[in-house]
Amino acid sequence: MLLIRGMRLSNAVTINFDLPDNGLKVIRGPNGSGKSLFLKSIAFLMKSEFDQFDFNGKSISQWNPEVYRSQVLYVPSSTFNLEMSVDEYLEYPRKLAVYGQKKWSGESVGLCRKFELSGKLGILSMGQRQILNIIRAIGLDARILLLDEPTSHLDPDMAHIAENLIMQWKESTKGSLVVISHEQMLASRLGTTSTLFSDLVLSAKSSQ
């Protein structure tokens, strides 16, 4: 589904990466290694250069950027506009032309109620915002979710719930996941093995 060759990130790291249909990759590495930069570059949220970048059998140059980003969806570890309400945050993608008049499923609304997610984002804990990001992401029609430290602010019980939501989405949609995390046991809980970020790197600055 994704084939990337010679991607040169803005921090001078060069990477090869493959992700098959219905694939799952958990990537670990230290802070500052470029994991988040890599994920944002896959999502075309950060500028990068590359020798080859194909998605779903087509070169990235053949994709409308907005359509591509709706299909390869970056999911941050937190929310940013803390003055926005939960409902506004959930509904925001509907303002984008690529989503048309998408209606949110009763399941998404029910999950927000289940986890008592309401009011302004600023009053929610970091963990609650992470759960909200996951709920919003799985309610959209993406083919790949790029999850940036999705459970970093969750206690073990809530992390387990978040992981179940992610894997249920993968099973029901046959979509693919790329997850970056510091946690060593996350990959095994998701039923796979982790990949060290350094193993993807072809070359890097001498200081790394």
Image: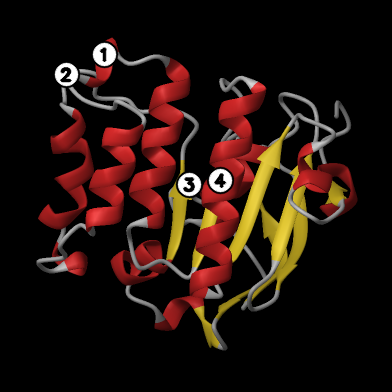
Judge from the rendering whether residue 195 lies leftward or rightward of residue 138; answer left or right.
right
Q: Nearer the viewer, mark 3 or mark 4?
A: 4
Mark positioned earlier in the residue sequence (1 or 3): 3
Q: CA distance from mark 2 to mark 3?
A: 25 Å
Q: CA distance from mark 1 to mark 3?
A: 26 Å
Residue 173 coordinates in the image, percent (x, y): 49, 73
Residue identified by numbered label 3: 46
Residue 34, quarter of picture: top right
Mark positioned earlier in the residue sequence (1 or 2): 2
Mark positioned earlier in the residue sequence (1 or 4): 1
At a point 61% along the width and 19% down the height, the residue shown is: 155
Mark positioned earlier in the residue sequence (3 or 4): 3
Residue identified by numbered label 1: 122
Judge from the rendering whether residue 83 lies leftward or rightward of residue 30; answer left or right.
left
Residue identified by numbered label 4: 147
Q: Secondary structure at mark 4?
A: strand
Residue 1 coordinates in the image, percent (x, y): 61, 78
Residue identified by numbered label 2: 83
Q: CA distance from mark 3 to mark 4?
A: 16 Å
Q: Nearer the viewer, mark 1 or mark 3?
A: 1
Q: Name the residue type under label 3.
A: Met
